[in-house]
Image (cartoon, grey):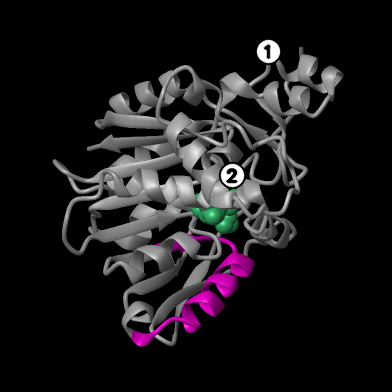
């Protein structure tokens, strides 16, 4: 069966389309580098950000944060949020006392992040730096900076080939102790969402594929836990733990949070860390150490 091409970022990984030129501009303590490449996420930004108002979005945000927190060492950490989007993880971590570089090539997303950061107290604002760069350009843009924690949540599914991105994330982590927190789409559970929604033909179509039309309406790619684990190992990092995210709520597409959302999150938290449930989470969250 022919595999469909990826949605918005299909050609960017490893073979960037067109030349990129950028220059830094300081805005209120944040470093922006205005890019001349069209923003591939501009049309998807509001749809993506809006999903955080639904039960699925809340489950994702709460679980990923809680799973990450399980592994964070004590003290104030230096964090890179690669593809950090509208800044919600960065703001949350900066509010906990960490210093965060949010790296993203989307002007639309960076502007949203800038607005969210502007609403924070000065102590939080001063701990976040916005950097206009793609993951592919991150090493060059950031120079020799290495991080205690490197986040990359919901980005790898837009890459044709996951290997170069995993290599970049590992290279950004501090040797010997740096953690990488990677959220990917689970290639092994793609048929569950359409099946639980009664879309049987769609479920049959994606059963043997590694990609499908994601929640934003574009084709995105999934990875199995084992192949990401192998990519980490080839890049010089080892898997510490992995979790399933949205095991039970993924198919409830636009459902707003019900009054008992805390219990839903608690249930998702508990099934997300045990077999066999975590295997069928729509998203997988891997924690690796360099
Ligand atoms: C689905 S959003 C995830 C945002 C955030 N990490 C979260 O979990 O809420 C994907 C993000 O990846 C960014 N992105 C797209 N291409 C990228 C690339 N080549 N390098 C780094 N980030 C990229 C997009 O601009 C967007 O902000």
Q: Is 20 above or below relative to 7?
A: below
Total number of numbered labels? 2
Q: Is 29 above or below relative to 273?
A: below
Q: Residue at x 34, y 53 (%)?
A: 139
Residue lying furthest left in this view?
Answer: 176
Q: Residue at x 63, y 52 (%)?
A: 18
Q: Residue at x 58, y 19 (%)?
A: 188
**Front disc: 1 or 2:** 1
Q: Residue 119 lies in magenta, yes or no? A: yes
Q: Is 244 above or below relative to 49?
A: above
Q: Is residue 274 left or right of residue 36?
A: left
Q: Is residue 224 left or right of residue 149?
A: right
Q: Classify 10 Å Cα crowding around label 2: few (below 14), some (14-19), many (20 and above).
A: some
Which label was assigned to residue 208?
Answer: 1
Does any atom of ligand 1 lie closer than 8 Å to the CB of label 2?
yes
1 or 2: tag closer to the N-terminus: 2
Q: Residue 197: image x %, image y %?
A: 79, 29
Q: Residue 253: image x %, image y %?
A: 74, 43
Q: Which residues are magenta?
A: 102-122
Q: Residue at x 53, y 26 (%)?
A: 223
């Amino acid at each position: 069966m022919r595999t469909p091409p990826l949605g918005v970022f299909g050609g960017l990984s490893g073979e960037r389309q067109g030349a990129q030129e950028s220059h830094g501009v300081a805005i209120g303590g944040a470093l922006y580098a205005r890019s001349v490449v069209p923003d591939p996420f501009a049309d998807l930004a509001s749809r993506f950000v809006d999903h955080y108002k639904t039960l699925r979005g809340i489950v994702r945000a709460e679980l990923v944060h809680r799973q990450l927190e399980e592994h964070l060492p004590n003290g104030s950490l230096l964090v890179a949020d690669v593809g950090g989007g509208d800044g919600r993880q960065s703001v949350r971590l900066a509010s906990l006392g960490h210093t965060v570089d949010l790296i993203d090539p989307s002007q639309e997303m960076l502007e949203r992040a800038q607005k969210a950061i502007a609403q924070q107290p000065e102590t939080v604002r001063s701990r976040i730096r916005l950097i206009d760069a793609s993951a592919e350009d991150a090493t060059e843009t950031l120079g020799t900076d290495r991080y205690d924690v490197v986040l990359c949540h919901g980005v790898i599914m837009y890459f044709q080939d996951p290997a170069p991105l995993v290599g970049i994330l590992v290279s950004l982590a501090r040797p010997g102790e740096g953690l990488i927190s990677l959220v990917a789409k689970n290639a092994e559970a793609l048929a569950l969402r359409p099946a639980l929604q009664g879309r049987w033909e769609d479920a049959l179509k994606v059963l043997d594929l590694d990609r499908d039309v994601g929640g934003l309406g574009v084709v995105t790619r999934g990875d199995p836990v084992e192949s990401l684990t192998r990519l980490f190992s080839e890049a010089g990092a080892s898997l510490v733990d992995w979790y399933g995210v949205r095991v039970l709520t993924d198919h409830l597409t636009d459902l707003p949070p019900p009054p008992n959302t805390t219990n839903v999150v608690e249930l998702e938290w508990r099934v997300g860390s045990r077999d066999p449930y975590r295997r069928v989470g729509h998203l997988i969250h891997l924690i690796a150490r360099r």
